[in-house]
Structures are given as C-alpha cells and as structure tokens.
Image: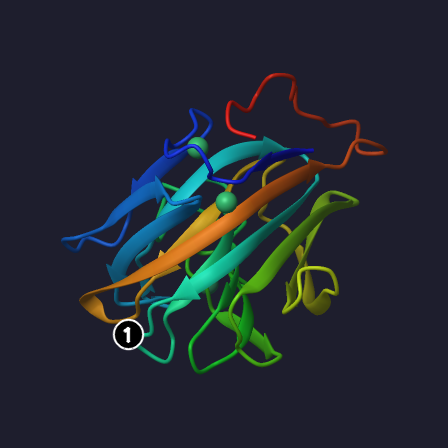
C-alpha cells in the first residue's frame, strides 16, 4: 500500500498533472496539508470530456481511496473525485473510463463509458452529498475483462457501493488520479483533497507493480 497525505507542501514525483479542460486558471498545489485542484470545463459527458487530473499509472488490480475535503459549488454537476482511464491525457479518445465523484446537488455518482468511445455516458447516483467525504474505486480481474466498483463514505470507514461495472476496454495498466470538472466552462472550481491511498491487489491475476521506494511523501 502506498499513500500520500499531502503534508510536505510539495507535489511528490510520482504524480503527473494534466489540464484537459481548455480554460484559463486550471491549477494544482499542495499546501496546508492538503491538495488543491482548480479546474473548469463544460462537462465529462457525451460530447464533452474536459477536466484536470493529478494521476499516475497502476499495473493490474487496485483499491484507491481519497478524501474530498471540500468542493466549490459552481454548478449542480461540478464533479470531484477519482478518475480511471487507459490514458489520462486522452480526453475524448481514451477508453477504460470510470469516474467516481461527488457533486453539489446530484449526490455521489459512478460514471462510466459504456459505449467505449472515450466519453462518459452512464451515471449511477447514490447517497447524499456531504463534506468531508471519501471515495473509493476497486479494480478486479474478471476473465479477459476488468471489473470496477465505486463506493462513497461519509465517515471514512463505512463505504457504500454505488455500482460495479464490467469493462471490456480497460487496459491492464491504467492511469488513476484525482480529477475535477467544474461543469461551468470558464468558471473554475476549487477542490480540496487529502489522504490518497492505493492498495495493489497481488494475487490470482499475476499482475503487480514494483512499489518499493515509490513514494517520497508519506
Ligand atoms: Ca507532497
Ligand atoms: Ca494531509
Ligand atoms: Ca461513451
């Protein structure tokens, strides 16, 4: 298991930031023991795929959790959460695409690209928005495909499953990260994260990632 508590005021070398929202003001920073992502964008839905993400690649199965401390409400559908896809820089093209997010007015949502065209098209919503909250995605092998299950928690210990989806377009190695879309185009939203962790599931898949000394900020 590797984790990042964002406590040393410096973005660790494992992370890469990508700005896919095409608007001014997109940014990220680590300060005050937390991670801030500011992003705009019209949407991540059907013909739109605009977001910013701080991410890294993971080989094989995993469990990812992160705490969402706060979300600036600039639209009912501002989305803040964990994004997974084959290539985080491939907006509108990259498949194997899942987004487990919290929204200001549409609660927790597990969204995925059921048509495998690089755009999210299916949303399953659950719970009731609260902050802080915790989000989780578990990726497990399912024959030749991968299963993805999204969860939310409002206390950091009890998680509720929102949806489990079998995905035929997910690579063994995928990019996984925190992601934000303001859903207000050029109006950006400030979103604060903390306590990211990954747990690489080593076992029947035979796929695992070398992890030793991977993190500089624990
Ligand atoms: Ca750091
Ligand atoms: Ca922290
Ligand atoms: Ca789609």
Which residue is nearer to you in this view: 16 or 204? 16
Q: Residue at x 55, y 55 (%)?
A: 67
Q: x and y percent of residue 104 in the render?
A: 42, 77
Q: Residue at x 60, y 17 (%)?
A: 213
Tell me: residue 7, above or below residue 216. below
Which residue is nearer to you in this view: 113 or 185? 185
Please give the residue where the numbered disc 1 appears in the rendered image.
74
Which residue is nearer to you in this view: 153 or 117? 153
Tell me: residue 68, above or below residue 123. above
Which quadrant does the N terminus fall into? top right
**Where is residue 161, by image quadrant?**
bottom right
Which residue is nearer to you in this view: 142 or 14? 14
Q: x and y percent of residue 53 in the render?
A: 38, 47
Instruction: Please indicate whether residue 161 sits to the left or right of residue 93 in the image.
Output: right
**Where is residue 137, by image quadrant?**
bottom right
Tell me: residue 103, above or below residue 116. below
**Where is residue 128, by image quadrant?**
bottom right
């Amino acid at each position: 298991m590797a984790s990042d508590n964002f406590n040393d005021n410096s973005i660790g070398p494992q992370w890469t930031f990508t700005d896919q929202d095409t608007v001014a003001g997109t940014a990220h920073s680590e300060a005050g023991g937390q991670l801030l992502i500011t992003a705009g964008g019209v949407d991540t839905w059907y013909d739109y795929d605009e977001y910013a993400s701080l991410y890294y690649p993971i080989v094989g199965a995993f469990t990812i959790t992160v705490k969402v401390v706060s979300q600036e409400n600039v639209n009912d559908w501002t989305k803040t959460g964990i994004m997974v896809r084959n290539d985080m820089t491939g907006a509108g093209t990259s498949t194997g695409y899942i987004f487990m997010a919290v929204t200001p007015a549409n609660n927790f949502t597990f969204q995925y690209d059921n048509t495998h065209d690089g755009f999210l098209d299916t949303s399953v919503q659950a719970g009731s928005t609260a902050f802080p909250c915790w989000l989780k995605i578990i990726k497990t092998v399912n024959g030749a495909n991968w299963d993805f299950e999204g969860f939310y928690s409002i206390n950091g210990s009890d998680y509720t499953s929102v949806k489990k989806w079998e995905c035929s377009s997910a690579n063994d190695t995928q990019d996984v990260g925190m992601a934000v879309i303001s859903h207000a185009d050029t109006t950006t939203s400030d979103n604060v994260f903390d306590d990211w962790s990954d747990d690489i599931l080593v076992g029947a898949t035979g796929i695992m990632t070398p992890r030793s000394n991977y993190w500089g900020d624990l």
